[in-house]
Amino acid sequence: MTGQIHVVGIRSPRAVFEKIERREDVKVFLLIKKVYENIFTRIINYFLMQLKISFIIFTLRKTDEVFVFFVGGELFFFPILTIKVMRKKVILMPAGITLKVHSLKNEPLYNLASLIMSINLRLADKIIIYSRTLIKDMNIERYQHKIVISHEHFVDFTKFKIYKKVNDRLDVVGYIGRLSEEKGILNMVMAIPLVIKRSHSINFIICGEGELASKIMGIIKNERLEGYVTLTGSIPHKDVPQYLNKMKLLVLPSYTEGLPNIILEAMACGTLVLATPVGTVPDVIKDSETGFLLKSNDPKHIAERIIELLNKPELLEKVSINAYNFVRENFSYEKTLESWKKIINEL
């Protein structure tokens, strides 16, 4: 095995790879995936993309021994089959969310995706998941013998840090992420007028873009919330610490999650996280210790929790410190790197 790393990126902006492309030991293959509405066009595009990836993998047969498929890669049937034919090793790292997202969106290709994922789980040499709680959630108990508990997450603590203590900030509640159904963002938006009725001093910042953007703008206009809600659209990752340090609370009312980076980044900035207990979230967010958990993502419940927490400054300060210490201890680059070295060496 050579000292070079090959990265295949799909439908990601070039900026994501700018930093690693400058390294001599990394080569990036960037493929742009087009999104089509027509079901037949989507199927054809899916097969073409799979064949492109398979060809790239075939060209690397003399150098690469281990191939790692991150979130979404568990649906790459042809590339994984190509690797197994070449007698190389496959590591799958499903976050436990891909099929749930397909289900929530009523994807017509859900059954096909489910079948492909089942086959790929059998073909994989190792399956890496973020938490043992996902084993039952993903219905993968039969693969216990090749499951490893680990994650690829780490935080750059030179960028994500506390610039202003949580109780020195204004009463600002935020959201950073995709504006899509599985994120529960509409539930949060519908909670805003319920919060404003109780307190006119609370403001909201919503950062992100997605298919629900126009619907969210419509709700804000209809409810006359323009003076209380700021919609930023997509923000550069370098600006995320600045936005997090403006917020007292980051709300993530998701229907499904793996382990969102934004939770860890918020904790590093001393921003309190209020999230639904889905995926691996409860492993990181311990209610009233390192963050706060929602019992549901019902708009009324979200509003009640926001009001309740913003009226408890002493609790917010204590949990903010706990969250910061927890993420510093468990999600450093060095700790994550050591974990992955061990996994790959075992193969």
Image (cartoon, grey):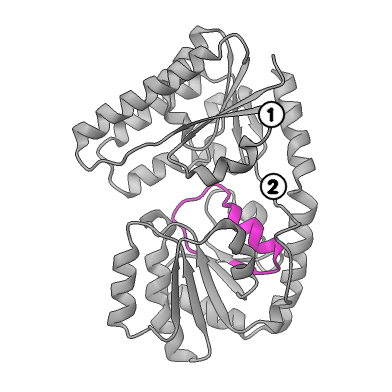
Rendered image: mark on residue 24: 1
**Magenta segment includes 257:** yes
Q: Start and end of the magenta stretch?
A: 252-273
Residue drawn at point x = 30 percent, y = 66 percent: 214
Q: Residue 100 sits in which quadrant?
A: top left
Crowd band around label 2 with a 10 angstrom C-alpha radius: few (<14), some (14–19), many (20+):
some
Q: Residue 171 sits in which quadrant?
A: bottom right
Quadrant (top left, top right, bottom left, bottom right) of the C terminus: top right
Q: Three-letter amino acid code at disc 1? A: Glu
Position above or below: 36 against 281: above
Residue 297 in picture, x, y percent from top left? 44, 65
Residue drawn at point x = 76 percent, y = 27 percent: 342
Residue 82 in picture, x, y percent from top left? 46, 13
Residue 89 in picture, x, y percent from top left? 60, 16
- Mark 1 and mark 2 lie on one chain; the one further toward the N terminus is 1
Residue drawn at point x = 59 percent, y = 73 percent: 249
Secondary structure of the residue carrying numbered label 1: loop
Residue 51 in picture, x, y percent from top left? 37, 20
Given residues 184 and 338, the one toward you in this image is 338
Front tag of 1 and 2: 1
Secondary structure of the residue carrying numbered label 2: loop
In the image, 266: left or right of 215? right
Q: Which residue is mark 2?
A: 154
In the image, 25: left or right of 143? right
Quadrant (top left, top right, bottom left, bottom right) of the N terminus: top right
Position above or below: 240 against 170: above
| Callouts 1 and 2 close, C-beta under 8 Å | no
Position above or below: 36 against 116: below
Crowd band around label 1 with a 10 angstrom C-alpha radius: few (<14), some (14–19), many (20+):
few
